C-alpha cells in the first residue's frame, strides 16, 4: 500500500526552523515543519488571520543570511498546522531549497529529482 508521503509528486523534507508568514500588512512568526517545491507546512501561529483567497508570502530563515522566500496560497488549515501551495519561488530560493534537500536526505539523487520537479510539468 502506498502512503501519502510516497504519493507526493515533490520531494518533501522535514525541517524545523523559524519562518514568517505575511499577508498584506499582517506578519506572523511561526515555525516551518516541512517543505518542498510545491509548498510548506507551518505550525499554526496564535491568532492567525490568513485569507485563502489572497496570496501570502513566506520567508524561511536558514542561517548565514540564507533565506527561502515563496509566494503561497493557503490550501488547508487546522489548529496545529497550516498547509500552503507554492505559487512562485525565485531562483535563489530554489538553490537554497535544493541544497537543503541535498543536506537532509540520504538519497544522493535527491538534488536531481528536485530539478526534474522544477522543469517537468505535473498534471
Image (cartoon, grey):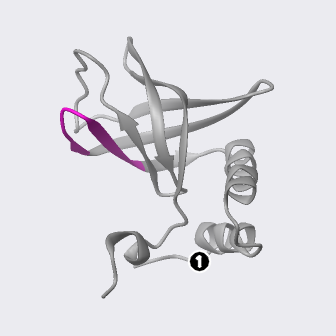
Judged left or right of residue 30, residue 81 is left
Q: Residue at x 25, y 27 (%)?
A: 50
Q: Quadrant of the N terminus?
A: bottom left
Q: Where residue 80 sits: x, y (%)?
A: 25, 35
Q: Residue at x 29, y 34 (%)?
A: 54
Between residues 89 and 15, which one lies in front from this camera angle?
Answer: 15
Comparing 56 with 33, the one in front is 33
Rendered location of residue 100, percent (x, y): 70, 49
Asked which secondary structure carries label 1, the reply is loop
Tell me residue 48's x, y (percent): 25, 20
Span shown in magenta? 76-85
Task: Choose top left, top right, bottom left or bottom right for residue 42.
Answer: top left
Taking the view exactly as shown, the residue that stands out farthest to the right is 64
Q: Is residue 37 above or below residue 55?
A: below
Residue 77 magenta-drawn? Answer: yes
Left or right of 14, for residue 123: left
Q: Position of residue 123 (x, y in %)?
A: 39, 79
User: On the picture, is 119 further left or further right than 57?
Assistant: right
The extreme top residue here reads 25
Residue 37 painted magenta: no
Residue 69 versus residue 1: which sits nearer the camera?
1
Quickly name the residue at label 1.
120
Residue for point 67% across, 49% down: 97
Number of marks: 1
Residue for point 67% across, 62% down: 105
Compared with residue 72, is residue 114 higher up or lower down, i.e. above or below? below
Q: Residue furthest bottom?
A: 1
Amino acid at each position: 500500500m502506498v502512503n501519502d508521503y510516497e504519493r507526493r509528486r515533490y520531494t518533501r523534507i522535514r525541517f524545523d526552523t523559524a519562518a514568517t508568514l505575511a499577508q498584506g500588512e499582517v506578519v506572523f512568526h511561526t515555525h516551518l515543519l516541512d517543505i518542498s517545491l510545491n509548498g510548506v507546512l507551518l505550525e499554526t501561529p496564535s491568532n492567525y488571520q490568513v485569507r485563502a483567497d489572497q496570496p501570502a508570502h513566506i520567508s524561511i530563515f536558514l542561517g548565514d543570511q540564507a533565506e527561502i522566500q515563496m509566494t503561497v496560497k493557503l490550501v488547508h488549515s487546522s489548529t496545529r498546522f497550516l498547509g500552503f501551495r507554492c505559487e512562485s519561488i525565485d531562483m535563489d530560493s530554489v538553490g537554497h531549497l535544493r541544497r537543503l534537500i541535498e543536506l537532509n536526505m540520504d538519497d544522493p539523487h535527491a538534488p536531481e529529482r528536485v530539478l526534474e520537479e522544477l522543469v517537468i510539468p505535473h498534471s
